[in-house]
Image (cartoon, grey):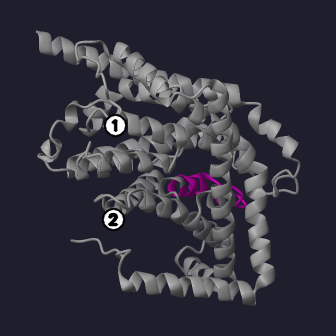
Amino acid sequence: MRFPTFRTRSREFTVALAALTAVLVLSIIVFPERAFQSSLNGLSIWWNVVFPSLLPFLMLGELMTGFGAVRGLGTLLEPLVRLLFRLPGIGGWAIAIGAVAGMPAGAETVGKLRRDNLVSREEGETLLAVSHVASPFFLFTVIGAGFLHNPATGAALAVIHYGTALLTGLLLRFRRSKTSMASVPGAADRHSLPRGRWKTPAPRERSLVARALANMHEARLEDGRSFGKLLGDSVSGAIQTLMMIGGYMIVFSVLAGVLDTIGIVRIASEIVALLAPSLRDTAETVRAVFSGLLELHIGTNRLSRLDGADVWMAAMVGAALAWSGAAVHFQVKTAIRQTDLRYRTFLVSRLVHATLAFAATPIVWKPLSGMLPGGAETSFLQLTAETTVPPADPLSAWGIWSDVPHRILVLASVVAAMALLSIIWAGLSRTAKTT
């Protein structure tokens, strides 16, 4: 059964875009006050929470890339990527970039790998789904410390998010044909550098750690920027990314406000109330869900502030993170535009990931709450006068940043554990080949 999608080059798609744009502009003209208030709400969340939370970590991601650390990490993860997803070793680099920089950086990397013919189409589509995850910085700082005021909840959501992403990748592994690994000659033997950059490949006889260090060193030399230049580029790049995120947040916040104003939310709320009469504050829940479908930051913020939120609200936040919002989908489609990677495969992977995240949360939430320091089950905020509005003083971002060293330590421990597993597997594989 084929999954129907609009063809972006079709006349119908052009007409649909023109009609939607006309409706949006007309709604803004007819309801200017609501549009202004919606844009102001999006701007407030961006400035008070998203901007101070993500700025240092976007800079850190650029610095890691410039110093070659991301490429070295990708090399370390090669055996693990091969074992879990039957992907060529170069996939470790794309997954590492996606994990450090967050969505849609993984899609941009996968698109480049496919254009360079370093992965087959099926490999690229699997890699696109596996590398499309929220960055741990976003989960810990924006969601945990920023929206929920409890890093333990961000950690619990991170475990669920990455665990279900891994399960989604494993399901895609069995979808691929047995011949997909041979569809690109030599793809499985390539390492974590794209074509044109691999000048002196490390011999296969060298240890995995030695190859990772060699690749990291070559990546730094190829980058060629001094520390001052790299630091300046990291600042400008982070600001540019945050401005793009802010623009998306404002536009989709206005769109959500328009849907509410013209009665779409009210109609959906009445339907949901009939289907789930026990649901509290149906209208606000539907608004939050609509926001999550359109834009990730706005949606997760609204979901985290629902009155009387519980484990089911956590499941909705997890599903929104897995879906990642229409705004990110547009960016992914742009990243793979000049390739033969199919968007419908990515769309199905997002639906599968969201379903798994929503279903897994009620099962693992209590055990995770018991294992994490301080517990995560009670961290969803009850709405009060003190918590309904994000802090207006930008200096209050220090409250978000104060726990940064601990979160970085936790992240480094997880990455080190994954690298250790990969090194052990590489050693076992080499021993098996020599015996």
Give coordinates of residue 201: x percent, y percent.
Answer: 28, 22
**Badge 2 density bin: few <14, some 14–19, many ≥20, Cα 10 Å:** some
376 lies left or right of 332: right
**Which residue is pictured at 61% across the width and 25% down the height?**
226
Query: Which of 158/54 is in front?
Result: 54
Magenta-drawn segment: 303-320
Image position, residue 274 (x, y; %)? 56, 81
Q: Which quadrant of the view contains residue 301?
A: bottom right
**Viewer-closest of 153 and 259:** 259
* Residue 153: quarter of image: top right
Q: Farthest residue in the top direction? A: 435
Q: Amino acid at mark 1?
A: Pro
Whether residue 189 is visible, yes or no, is: yes
Residue 114: which numbered mark, if any? none
Marks 1,2: beta carbons within 8 A? no
| Residue 280 visible in the picture | no
Residue shown at 26%/39% (left/top)?
Answer: 87
Q: For the residue carrying disc 1, how many other residues have a C-alpha within 10 Å: few (<14), some (14-19), or many (20+)?
A: some
Of the residues shown, which amino acid type is indicated by label 2? Arg
* Residue 317 part of the magenta segment: yes
* Frontmost residue, 80 versus 371: 80
Residue 344 disc label: 2
Q: Quarter of the image containing the C terminus?
A: top left
Front disc: 1 or 2: 1
Q: Identify the mark nearer the N-term, 1 or 2.
A: 1
Q: Position of residue 311 (x, y in %)?
A: 59, 51
Residue 46 in the image, given as x and y percentages of width and height: 73, 55
Secondary structure of residue under mark 1: loop
Residue under label 1, please give it. Answer: 194
User: Is 121 in the magenta?
Assistant: no
Where disc 2 sits, the SS reads helix
